[in-house]
């Protein structure tokens, strides 16, 4: 009943579709196993694509599969034969393309009943499976050549430690033929490796055994059309199941299986073979006699490998044959993010260059600061020497008093020694006075030497009250000589600051002498300088006020600039040096006119947290 159904369907579908359209070409493709089986599905896909690409005519392509090829039962072919006879009874194909050895055998056995005069193209068939005696002048063959020893030796080259190779092959008639051919071809490997066959087992048992192969093993996948129980296994799914359990690398003969499970090697190219076969088909449809078209059997294509599988099984690329291609290589971080990495490196280099420039500029600035401080120190030293001349009268006055006292006491002591009655206690008082006056003179000289000494900037914690008091003592003679009254209003608590005592005293001397000069034209009664120290939160303040004419309103912003002076013989460096010294102590100096008369200079220096300050 099945064959009657085939005949009925054939009669229905054999209506004259292309009547009146002789420019159309009708092609029948007969597959050996089925389009759902790999590698046949890959050949069917590439062949149809090449037909559409190469054909200059509209094509009507019908494909059929010889399902009976999965078993050895020849009688199962009869219904299929009757189906084809009915389908093409009224409209024979212009060309029959036969894919694979089982389909070629079927067509040659039944050619007289089916298509005695139709051109035939036999393709995707191994040269040993071609029945040359049954070929006619209306036939041509595009065959391939399997060289199993080449495949196995190539794999042993890239994996030289391999000791065992398991061959996965089905038990259909075609697969049995190829077992015999492989056994014969692989005889040279006897004694070198162990070859295990898995064609006489249900596929489930095969998978269990292939999951526990010994170390240094490999698997050669041929195909699995039907296992020993006759169960058909679609090539793609069967290979994927094997891949999921296998503990050894897998290689094969056909690149239709390449792309995930297979390590690779020399293989037949489905695309290359399909292009060759379709090119021959187009020539036949164009009128060439098939028997005149001779195509030599194709060999394995250049070796290609799956980078992922090479990595998985630790196979070095250095062992691959020359000219091999490696596919699916994972892009390196540089290849994936080349522009991002380049941009990041550019930013890093730019930052490094900027940091280098900043460090260089910082070094230059620090060097300039040190050099400027040295120059400032030298200039301040010169300034102190220039002030020393003006302090001569004050220094002489300071020294004359103790030296005069020493002279008087010495003469008195000499007279007492000549007296018949020596008063020892009075003599001791005289000697004590001499010692005190000597210490007083020595202190004056020490202060002068300290002022004139050339020494680098040395910041120490000092009491600002003491520094101010010493300075006023030093200029007391000058004040007396110029008729200037000095009023002191020093803070009752210590004012600890961190700084260089000599340089700060130089600032005070400069301000004091400027104030004295400003009042030189006034009456003695009006020549008064008020010096005050105080604490203002975290700062110590010094104020020096005079009763002179003050500072011109338009010049307040310029008086600390270099070379500005209101004195006819002044150099204009005193206040500039004073500002530099104060700023070097992280302080501030300012000037203003008093509400009454005269000028007021204010110095603010940061206090340090010392025990004396805490006690206050």
Image (cartoon, rainbow, N blue to C red):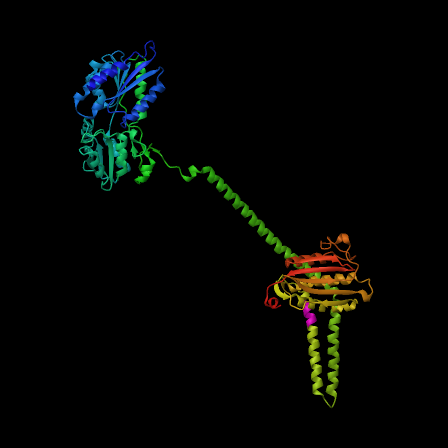
Q: Nearer the viewer, residue 580 or 62?
A: 62
Location of residue 26 by image quarter: top left
Residue drawn at (29%, 32%), measured in percent from left and top? 265
Residue drawn at (74%, 88%), measured in percent from left and top? 419
Percent across and percent down for residue 311 are 33, 39
List the single residue furthest toward the bottom: 420
Magenta span: 443-449
Asked if residue 251 lies left or right of residue 429, the reply is left
Percent across and percent down for residue 402 are 73, 75
Magenta: main secondary structure equals: helix
Q: Nearer the viewer, residue 159 or 88?
A: 88
Q: Magenta stretch containing residue 448, yes or no?
A: yes
State which quarter of the image contains the C terminus: bottom right
Percent across and percent down for residue 130 are 22, 21
Q: Is residue 463 visible?
A: yes
Q: Nearer the viewer, residue 90 or 69?
A: 90
Q: Is residue 292 visible?
A: no
Location of residue 64 by image quarter: top left
* In the rendered image, the vertical position of residue 557 relative to residue 270, given as above or below: below
Q: How many marks?
A: 0
Location of residue 445 by image quarter: bottom right
């Amino acid at each position: 009943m099945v064959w009657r159904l085939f005949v009925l369907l054939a009669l229905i579908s054999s209506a004259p579709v292309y009547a009146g359209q002789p420019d159309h070409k009708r092609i029948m493709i007969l597959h050996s196993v089925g389009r759902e089986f790999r590698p046949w599905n890959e050949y069917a896909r590439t062949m149809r694509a090449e037909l559409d690409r190469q054909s200059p005519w509209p094509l009507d392509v019908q494909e059929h599969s010889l399902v009976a090829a999965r078993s050895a039962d020849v009688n199962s072919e009869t219904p299929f034969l009757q189906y084809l006879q009915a389908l093409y009874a009224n409209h024979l194909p212009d060309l029959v393309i036969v894919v694979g050895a089982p389909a070629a055998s079927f067509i040659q056995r039944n050619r007289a009943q089916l298509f005695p005069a139709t051109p035939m193209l036999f393709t995707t068939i191994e040269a040993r499976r071609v029945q040359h005696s049954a070929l006619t002048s209306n036939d041509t063959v595009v065959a391939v050549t399997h060289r199993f020893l080449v495949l196995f030796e190539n794999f042993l080259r890239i994996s030289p430690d391999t000791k065992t190779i398991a061959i996965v092959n089905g038990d259909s008639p075609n697969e049995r033929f190829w077992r015999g051919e492989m056994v014969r071809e692989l005889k040279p490997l006897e004694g070198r490796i162990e070859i295990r066959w898995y064609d006489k087992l249900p596929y489930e048992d095969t998978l269990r055994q292939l999951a526990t192969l010994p170390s240094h093993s490999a698997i050669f996948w041929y195909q699995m059309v039907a296992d020993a129980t006759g169960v058909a296994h679609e090539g793609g799914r069967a290979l994927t199941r094997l891949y999921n359990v296998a503990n050894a690398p897998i290689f094969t003969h056909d690149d239709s299986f390449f792309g995930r499970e297979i390590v690779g090697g020399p293989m037949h190219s489905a695309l290359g073979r399909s292009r060759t076969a379709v090119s021959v088909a187009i020539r036949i449809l164009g009128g060439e006699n098939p028997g005149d078209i001779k195509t030599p059997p194709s060999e394995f294509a250049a070796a290609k490998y799956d980078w992922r599988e090479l990595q998985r099984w630790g196979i070095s690329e250095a062992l691959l044959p020359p000219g091999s291609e490696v596919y699916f290589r994972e892009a390196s971080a540089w290849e994936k993010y080349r522009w991002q990495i380049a941009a990041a490196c550019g930013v890093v280099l730019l930052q490094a260059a900027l940091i280098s420039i900043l460090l260089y500029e910082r070094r230059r600035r620090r060097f300039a600061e040190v050099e400027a401080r040295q120059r400032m120190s030298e200039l301040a030293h010169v300034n102190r020497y220039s002030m020393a001349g003006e302090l001569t009268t004050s220094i002489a006055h300071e020294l004359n008093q103790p030296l005069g006292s020493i002279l008087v006491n010495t003469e008195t002591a000499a007279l007492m020694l000549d007296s018949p009655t020596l008063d020892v206690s009075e003599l001791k008082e005289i000697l004590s006075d001499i010692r005190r006056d000597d210490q007083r003179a020595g202190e004056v000289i020490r202060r002068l030497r300290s002022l004139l000494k050339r020494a680098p900037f040395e910041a120490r914690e000092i009491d600002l009250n003491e520094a101010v008091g010493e300075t006023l003592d030093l200029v007391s003679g000058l004040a007396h000589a110029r008729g200037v009254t000095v009023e002191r209003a020093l803070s009752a608590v210590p004012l600890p600051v961190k700084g260089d005592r000599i340089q700060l005293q130089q600032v005070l001397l400069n301000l004091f002498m400027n104030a004295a000069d400003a009042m030189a034209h006034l009456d003695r009664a009006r020549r008064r300088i008020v010096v005050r120290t105080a604490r203002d939160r975290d700062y110590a303040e010094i104020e020096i006020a005079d009763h002179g004419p003050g500072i011109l309103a338009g010049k307040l912003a310029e008086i600390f600039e270099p070379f500005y002076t209101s004195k006819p013989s002044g150099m204009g460096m005193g206040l500039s040096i004073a500002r530099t010294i104060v700023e070097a102590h992280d302080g501030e100096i300012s000037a203003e006119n008093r509400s009454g008369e005269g000028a007021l200079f204010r110095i603010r220096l940061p206090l340090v947290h010392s025990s004396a300050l805490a006690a206050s």
